[in-house]
Amino acid sequence: MRLASVTLARDEADIIEVFVRHNLHFVDCMYIIDDGSTDATRAILDLLQGEGLPLVRIEDGAHAAYNQGRRTTGLMHRAMRDEAWDFIFALDADEFIAIADRATLEAELDALPEPRIGAFSVTNYFPHADDDATDPNPLSRLTHVLDLPRGAGKVIVPGAFAGHPETLISDGNHIISRWHAEQPVTLLATADLAHFPVRSDDQLVAKCMVSYIRWRARPDYKASTASHHIEGARALMKEPGLLLERPDQLLLAYIPQLEGPVAVRPFVQRRAAPRYLDLARTYPYRRVLASLDALVEGARAGTAELNALRVQVTKAQAPFHLALAAALRKMRRSFLKRWLSLRMK
């Protein structure tokens, strides 16, 4: 069985290395779009490629708006042009396949009923006061999880669907549709995703602010869109200064389920440790300003395109205006000629 993953990543230097090293125990190739990272994400991916790991890094520029579903779908189609993969996993850069071994994963994929669309359940990890702050690896440092029942979270796309031009993965990788019709999914028996969305205060602040900017930049934005990112940004709006005074309130706004049951559950299936620790840094101000730059440049590009269109329209209409002006001049000369003729009579 041949397996691949597709990912849209931006500013994930603190976790991207272990993301690649771990998940390559379960997939044959990883396709990753670097979405205009401002930290060392791109450099780390280049180093991993230099080690000979089966990783395809794709440049796709820095986009002002967040369009994960459309771009992930395009990356999936690109992967299928390279090879007829049996299954493609749509993974975020902070998600890790959690199962004993690849053989068990393949057995669970083989057991999927038609149309063989699978789904991972997601276990969400979060920072806690008991974490070992000296541990640089978030996979071992974070041990507390939301204690929730298993349920279909992230889709697994079979090759027959992944190669179809009308297949679409939703924002968040939660839903797969064909011809705009949502497809049924089957939860894998035991395979889960360990999800590490929050690793530090700086990372969470930057994540909320950047996500707020990029989601709000979408023309189809609605108030219910990406609610956890938006609520996190609103919690930041209540801060009286640049120094984060209530990190617990920000975390609760971003993960409101923290008010429910939690459990200690170390990620024992982890298969990787970071080597490039000097590159695993978060630059919150840089991230936010880069997102604003992308928004400004997008607006400038739109204005320039509109101005160019106006010039084209003016040029296209010019022959008509010239012909009309010539006809009016001719009519004026004819009128004057007749008027003078009448006067002379």
Image (cartoon, helix red, strand yellow):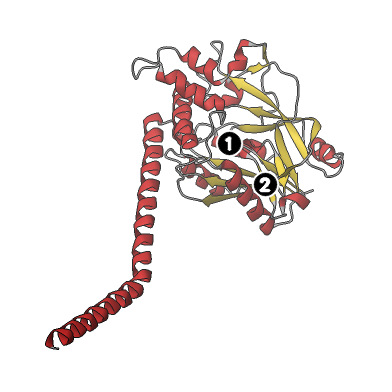
State the residue at coordinates (61%, 43%): 69
Q: Are marks 2 and 1 in contact (CB under 8 Å)?
A: no
Number of numbered discs overlaid on the protein picture:
2
Name the residue at the left extreme. 344
Q: Which residue is mark 2?
A: 168
Q: Is residue 158 visible?
A: yes
Q: Residue at x 62, y 18 (%)?
A: 143
CA gap, disc 2 and disc 1: 20 Å
Closer to us: 140 or 13: 13
> In the figure, 4 relative to 135: above or below?
below
Residue toward you, 194 or 294: 294
Judge from the rendering whether residue 231 lies leftward or rightward of residue 92; answer left or right.
left
Please state the horizontal and vertical placement of residue 211, each as a whole percent of the image. 48, 32
Q: Quadrant of the C terminus?
A: bottom left
> Viewed as shown, does residue 42 lie left or right of 299?
right
**Which label number is shown at residue 189?**
none
> Where residue 209 appears, x then y in whole percent?
44, 29
- Is 57 above or below relative to 260? below
Q: In front here: 272 or 255?
A: 255
- Within 10 Å of disc 2 (Cα), the crowding (few <14, some 14-19, many 20+) is many
Secondary structure type for disc 2: strand
Among the 4 quarters of the image, the one containing residue 117: top right
Judge whether 23 appears above or below 195 on screen: below
2 or 1: mark nearer the eye: 2
What amino acid type should be assigned to the residue bearing mark 1?
A: Ala
Secondary structure beneath dot 1 equals loop
Which of pointers 2 and 1 lies earlier in the amino acid sequence? 1
Judge whether residue 137 can be spotted in this image: no
Within 10 Å of the Cα at label 1, are there few (<14), some (14-19), or many (20+) other Cα atoms?
many
- Residue 63, percent from left and from top: 46, 45
Residue tagged 1: 93
Residue that appears at 47% across and 35% down: 216
